[in-house]
Image (cartoon, rainbow, N blue to C red):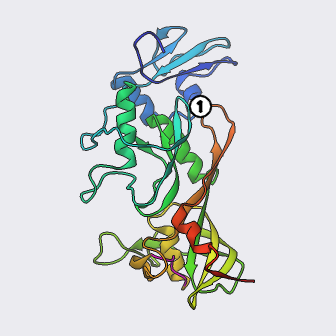
Amino acid sequence: MNGKDLRFRLVYPVDEDGLLLREFLHSKGISKRTLTATKYGGGSIEVNGIERTVRHPLCAGDVVVVVFPPEQPSAGLYPEDGKLTIIYEDEVLMMVDKPPGQSTIPSRDHPVGTVANSVAGKFAREKLPATVHIVTRLDRDTSGLICIAKNRHIHHLLSEQMIASGFYRQYLAFVEGQLASNQFIIEEPIGRKDGSIMERIVRKDGQYARTDVEVLGQFKKEGHYFTKIALVLHTGRTHQIRVHMQWAGHPVVGDDLYGSTHQLMGRQALHCAKISFTHPLTGEKLEFKSDVSQDMQALTYNEINRIE
């Protein structure tokens, strides 16, 4: 950062001759769209301290600096001084542990009190010229880890990593009934249910979706059988785990939208327990874990008989 200029910037040393600036920046994961937004949106691309066009030829020893334009907070996102459980933070991203019952982003029914509102408030207090980039979003009643980028470019890099299957997400859940297999893969396309704004279903014309499932234990409470499972997402479709487990005949406990009831829990028993990925700038492998919340822990307390 230079003085009061809080715009996000990246510095790249050049170690070979002959590349054009645009080719060099493309090799660093900066898209053509990002370059255009930088050029015309209040940013700059400099070589050795001088602003250059993307056609500028580079030499070994040059230093390229990309100053990204300031981002305007979303008009409908009200900054709040809300509580955030931040388990990791650096200059480009942060990891938050979300409790059940809190929305990730505002909606018509929940315009305030969300994770995004609190993050926007944090950015405002820190005078960070950025909007909130949610990389991994959780449903309101799902608890656990959320990844947030502080810059549009970092969001892009993490999204590309997710597409390339380099972004690992593991969930823990309790589902209805007893599963016949200890490990299996659900690879079924997901799309919107006809006539519904919210609900999704498995349908042939839906988007490709894959969920890996592993059984961790079988339980019974008052004659009600249910199973603890670990799930790994390879795609990120809306309600993916909830839809896939309903399709498999074992809806998530407490998920009354997708075939369960509130007999055991008042919300879906679903928690994002582990996320790992490669840091988009440093190349370091990062791994984060979150313990399940108390209401899910209560399902395996002494009053419940585990089936061995």
Q: Position of residue 159 (x, y in %)?
A: 52, 47
Q: Is residue 277 above or below residue 48?
A: below
Q: Position of residue 12 (x, y in %)?
A: 60, 20
Q: Is residue 147 above or below residue 240?
A: above
Q: What are the residue bounds of the magenta stretch?
A: 250-254
Q: Say which residue appears at 43% left-offset and 82% top-offset.
A: 261
Decide whether residue 253 is among the magenta residues.
yes
> In which quadrant of the rendered image does the C terminus lie?
bottom right
Rate crowding at label 1 as few (under 14), some (14 to 19) or many (20 or more) other CA atoms within 10 Å.
few
Q: Is residue 149 visible?
A: yes
Q: Is residue 208 visible?
A: no
Decide whether residue 42 is among the magenta residues.
no
Q: Is residue 41 above or below residue 121?
A: above
Residue type marked 1: Lys
Q: Position of residue 73 (x, y in %)?
A: 31, 35
Q: Position of residue 249 (x, y in %)?
A: 54, 86
Q: Main secondary structure of the magenta part?
A: loop
Q: Is residue 94 above or below residue 202?
A: above
Q: How many numbered dots are placed on residues in this image?
A: 1
Residue at the extreme right:
308
Left or right relative to 47: residue 105: left
Q: Which residue is mark 1?
A: 28
Residue at the extreme front:
303
Q: Secondary structure at mark 1?
A: loop
Q: Say which residue appears at 49% left-offset and 79% top-offset.
A: 264
141 and 305: which one is in front?
305
308 and 270: which one is in front?
308
Q: Say which residue appears at 50% left-offset and 44% top-offset.
A: 85
Left or right relative to 159: residue 279: right
Q: Say which residue appears at 67% left-offset and 81% top-offset.
A: 218
287 and 69: which one is in front?
287
